[in-house]
Amino acid sequence: MTVTGAAPRAADAERQRLARRLADVVGDTHVLTEPALRAPYETDFTGRWSGRSLLVVRPADPAQTAEAVRVCAAAGVPVVPQGGNTGLVGGSVPGGDGTEVVLSLRRLDGIGPVDPGARQVTVGAGATLAALQRHVRRHGLDFGVDLASRDSATLGGMAATNAGGERVLRHGTVRANVAGAEAVLADGGVLNRLAGLPKDNTGYDLGGLLIGSEGTLAVLTRLRLTLRPRPPRRAGALLALDSLAHAVGVLTALRRLESLELAEFFTADGLALVLEHSGLPAPFRHAHPVYLLVECAGSHGPLDELAAVVGELDAREVAVAVDDADRRRLAAYRERHTEAVNAAGTPLKLDVTVPLAELPEFVAGLPGLLAGRARAYVFGHLAEGNVHLNLLGVAAADEEELVHAVLRRIADTGGSISAEHGIGRAKAAYLPLTRSPADIALMRAVKAAWDPAGLFNPGAVLPPAGRPGHTGGRPTTRHRGGLTWTARP
Ligand code: MLT
Ligand code: ZN
């Protein structure tokens, strides 16, 4: 193992000492100190959030993870837990000063035997969603949460961020699909709540608290997941509609169907970008203002059910998917938005929830709010009012003001400044927009109880103490979670 880079000599010596101790735990090849090897762990999926780590350590199992945490804690070196690094809010990459260790959980990718009676399975934090799907579908079962980044997103990362994705309207977010968790604590101890007992009222739900904690309280190492029967029949349709208000009306009608599993919206601009980037053929001969992708799944004729309701709706055009290949073709128009936006530039991504009734007005008000300072692509999960607002071409000087204006508007609608991507470092300063001082004080107390020395994921979720963040009016502090970030407009 050799150490290179431009860090001062003292930092290099510290890196060498820590690297040697960690190599004793995980082996030489799993401690990465060279900048080129560290680089993929230091920049997030969008390329927007980028930091610098002291080194990257890749344990093979929970015992090595606990030992690695102990070594870092003894050295007083902060730890940033990382799964598939598909996060979008700077919560899985280190800060900018090169003092943090990235703890990659990807090697913890084991998947245990399916328990068909309990309908549960235990997985390592580093197993990908796609690997889990392949494993459990052989048993006619499925995991309730699905998302476009399934090939790289890990279950540990999904649990840490309480990921939502495409099927929340039927199965809930990750929180509703986790029966137990195992985690390494800040002192290297292990919390084991993996039994997965459906009834177990013995004090605080500590494992549950880790879901959505974004690696700030402990390091998730294994999860006990709840599975569901995989419905044998599926049907999908893409509906071309007049407006978002029209889409909300259509969704209301479709919710009569128990088999409804997915309702995803996108707009003409987004579809044009996807077509240009992917080379896919257009789904219809003409462009339309808004598109709604829907899917039903069940044992008996979801296609008939779906067709009956869709027939009553005044959609401009409808494409129906009769088999899996067709369904995947239609789904691609929605799922390929993220990569199409990324290919067009480095987006400023705002993932928000708007109460459904307010959603059309919120989106209609965006041009006024943005005042020509960004190209906006809007898509998302309609049933939850989950809007993915992807902004391209934002000048660095406009960025904070734009983010604040949008999130302030969200707070005014009674929505959430983070629907499913989390707070990370990107939104820590904005937490006071929708969380009261009492709420934030309690969160700080929870953090202090789990992680008194502030070892885990510094700067994520909570604004650094003493920095109040944004509560209203115009932004007062230029602030990136207290860290030096490279944000590329
Ligand atoms: C998605 O649903 O495709 C992602 O969560 C959103 C995004 O890339 O903004
Ligand atoms: Zn999403």
Image: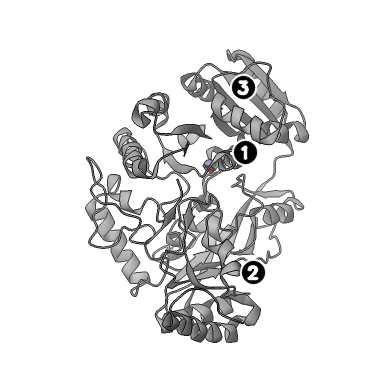
Indicate whether 282 appears above or below 64.
above
Q: Can you name the residue that lies furthest to the front here?
A: 6
Mark 1 or mark 3, which is nearer to you? 1
Q: Quadrant of residue 35?
A: bottom right
93 and 128: which is toward the camera:
93
Residue 277 at x, y = what percent? 65, 35
Label 1 secondary element: helix
Label 3 secondary element: strand
Which amino acid does the dot numbered 3 rest on? Leu
**Which numbered tag is attached to residue 107?**
2
Indicate whether 489 appears above or below 80.
above
Residue placed at 69% from the left, 22% from the top? Answer: 319
Residue placed at 52% from the left, 74% from the top? Answer: 5
Residue corresponding to mark 3: 239
Number of residues whose C-alpha sits closer than 10 Å to that of mark 3, classed few (under 14), some (14–19) or many (20 or more): many
Residue placed at 29% from the left, 49% from the top? Answer: 435
Q: Is residue 260 left or right of residue 446?
A: right
Marks 1 and 2, Cα distance to the nearest angstrom? 27 Å
Quadrant of the snapshot with the C terminus = top left
Residue 74 at x, y = what percent? 42, 84
Q: Is residue 375 left or right of residue 450?
A: right
Label 2 secondary element: loop
228 and 77: which is toward the camera:
77
55 and 243: which is toward the camera:
55
**Which numbered tag is attached to residue 335?**
1
Q: Is residue 398 visible?
A: yes
| Disc 1 residue lies near ligand 1 with CB under 8 A | yes
Q: Earlier in the sequence, mark 1 or mark 3?
A: 3
Q: Quadrant of ligand 1?
A: top right
Which amino acid does the dot numbered 2 rest on? Arg
Indicate whether 125 appears above or below 363.
below
Number of residues whose C-alpha sits closer than 10 Å to that of mark 1, classed few (under 14), some (14–19) or many (20 or more): many
